[in-house]
Amino acid sequence: MSAFIRLFPALFAGILFGFGLSVAQMIDPAKVLNFLDLTGTWDPSLALVMAGGLAVNALVTPFILKRDKPLFAEFFRLPGKLQIDARIIVGGIIFGAGWGIAGYCPGPLITSLSFANSDILVTFAAFVVGTFAARWVLAHRG
């Protein structure tokens, strides 16, 4: 099977995800920041988008996992770790702080690269540096 045929489902899913983010206006950092501003210009639409995604996932995942294997892969890749530890809590706090400061989480940020303005490019550069810094710290901690 050629590399393109193997990667086409991932490409299609990524395009569909990016289109969904655009339609829901989640690539607009003001939308995210308004969601986080509970005492000012609060906008609950982000919660509705998240609830919609969670509902679809909750309904469809059990049916998918009943299959012997995924449609376009050899086996399911499921997380092996189930307990919540300090690493997941600290990572969530850092992720949330970055999301609140910049108004972007990784999916909308990558989708917004098509605008190619300086704010998005600087935010993306910070995302890349932060990702590699976190990997370096995790690899070199004692």
Image (cartoon, rainbow, N blue to C red):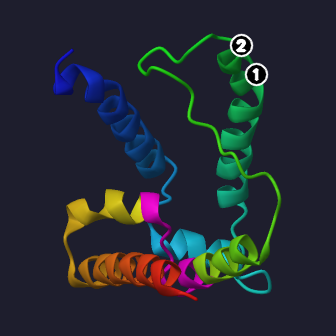
Relative image position of residue 42 (x, y in whole percent) = 72, 75
Task: Report the residue at 71% width, 70% height from top.
Answer: 88
Label for residue 62? 1
Is 141 on the left or on the right of 117, as rendered? Answer: right
The residue pinned by badge 2 equals 66
Residue 51 can be seen in this image? yes
- Kind of residue at badge 2: Lys
The main secondary structure of the magenta stretch is: helix
Residue 85 belongs to magenta span: no
Q: Is residue 48 above or below residue 40?
A: above
Kindly give the residue lying farthest to the right in the view shown: 83
Looking at the rendering, the stretch of residues picked out in magenta corresponds to: 97-107
Q: Is residue 39 above or below residue 92?
A: below
Relative image position of residue 12 (x, y in whole percent) = 33, 30
Is 51 on the left or on the right of 121, as rendered? Answer: right
Contact between labelled residues 1 and 2, with CB atoms less than 8 Å apart? yes
Q: Nearer the viewer, residue 53 or 131?
A: 131
Task: Report the residue at 47% width, 78% height from top.
Answer: 139
Quadrant in the picture for residue 52: top right
Relative image position of residue 109 (x, y in whole percent) = 39, 66
Label 1: element kind: helix
Q: Is residue 21 above or below residue 15?
A: below
Q: CA distance from mark 2 to mark 1?
A: 6 Å
Task: Report the residue at 67% width, 72% height from top.
Answer: 35
- Kind of residue at badge 1: Pro
